[in-house]
Image (cartoon, rainbow, N blue to C red):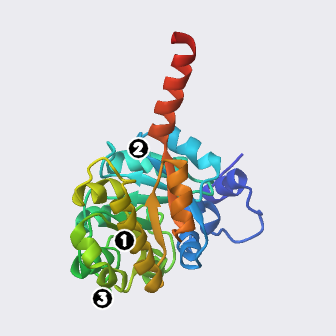
Amino acid sequence: MITSVRAWCVNFFGLPSGSPFHRSQIMSNTAWPNEFRRRLLAGETLIGSWCALASPVSTEVLGLAGFDWLVLDGEHAPNDITTFVPQLMALKGSRSAPVVRPPCNEPVIIKRLLDIGFNNILVPFVENEDEARRAVASTRYPPAGIRGVSVSHRSNMYGTVPNYNATINDNISVLVQIETQQAVDNIDAIAAVDGVDGIFVGPGDLSAALGYLGQPAHPEVLTVIKHIFERAKAANKPSGILAPVEADARRYLEWGATFVAVGSDLGVFRSATQALCDKFKK
């Protein structure tokens, strides 16, 4: 009979019974060091997908597919703290690193996302250097930033992770979205901000801001996207984008983007169900 929490963990996770209990062995994709950040900064090509259905089941299925990273969306999808936690749990044991997009660049929201276990933050609608610095500061404990301190939360396994406060600042990745003409004009200053680990293009909002709503593949938009990638590379920062159309994704990879989301659970589900219905209805 299992008589202690430690014994239960040894039994459930298959840890050697005679060895010290290392919490990192059960942290999976929330362990330190941040493997997604390491691979991103090393310039590896990382293929991801979007989680828009706000379901731990669909997120778990995506996590089984082998994507390098998954965005759990809090800007356009019906997600909040209470729906994110089950999805993070569903990704334990997955090779897919969870990345969260908050609804806005707001310190309290970002703090809460960090506390529940996200280490990779994709901040939308960053338009200048000050907003980029604000995004980074929201993810760092003082004196490096302004993240509020709690002694017990899911990210530090409720206070049981040794040296969490001293090490977590260096294990959080901050990705900022370029979505407006102002952001494009300020791309060099944004990319130069210390702590910004990657530049991500939001093609939908960017195309709208440039006057081509619903046309993310318009030649004028593509010219700007390529320019963003080039400026990110000049700053030695990786660049990424959402590209659910295969030809677009391959083009962006050829242009130097290294972290590309190639679809979403919602998009795959919508197209597959329509195709299945059409087989029998037409």
Q: Is residue 240 visible?
A: yes
Q: Residues within 10 Å of mark 3 (few under 14, many from 20)?
A: few
Comes first in the chain, label 3 or label 1: 3
Q: Is residue 152 visible?
A: no
- Residue 181 in percent (x, y) is at 23, 68
Amino acid carrying label 3: it is Pro
The image quadrant of residue 115 is bottom left
Q: Which mark is residue 21?
A: none
Q: Residues within 10 Å of mark 2 (few under 14, many from 20)?
A: many
The image quadrant of residue 71 is bottom left
Looking at the image, residue 260 lies above or below residue 226: above
Front label number (3 vs 1):
3
**Residues at marks 1 and 2, CA–CA distance in whole angstroms:** 31 Å
**Residues at marks 3 and 1, CA–CA distance in whole angstroms:** 17 Å
The quadrant of the rendering that contains the N terminus is top right
In this figure, which residue is indicated by the disc labeled 3? 143
In this figure, which residue is indicated by the disc labeled 1? 151
Identity of the residue drawn at 52% across and 12% down: 282
Amino acid carrying label 1: it is Val
Identity of the residue drawn at 53% across and 46% down: 90
Q: Which mark is residue 52?
A: 2
Q: Nearer the viewer, residue 147 or 241?
A: 241
The image quadrant of residue 34 is bottom right
Label 2 element class: loop
Comes first in the chain, label 3 or label 2: 2
Q: Residue furthest top?
A: 281
Q: Nearer the viewer, residue 268 or 162?
A: 268
Q: Residues within 10 Å of mark 1 (few under 14, many from 20)?
A: few
- Residue 248 in percent (x, y) is at 50, 54
Amino acid carrying label 2: it is Ala
- Residue 268 in percent (x, y) is at 51, 37
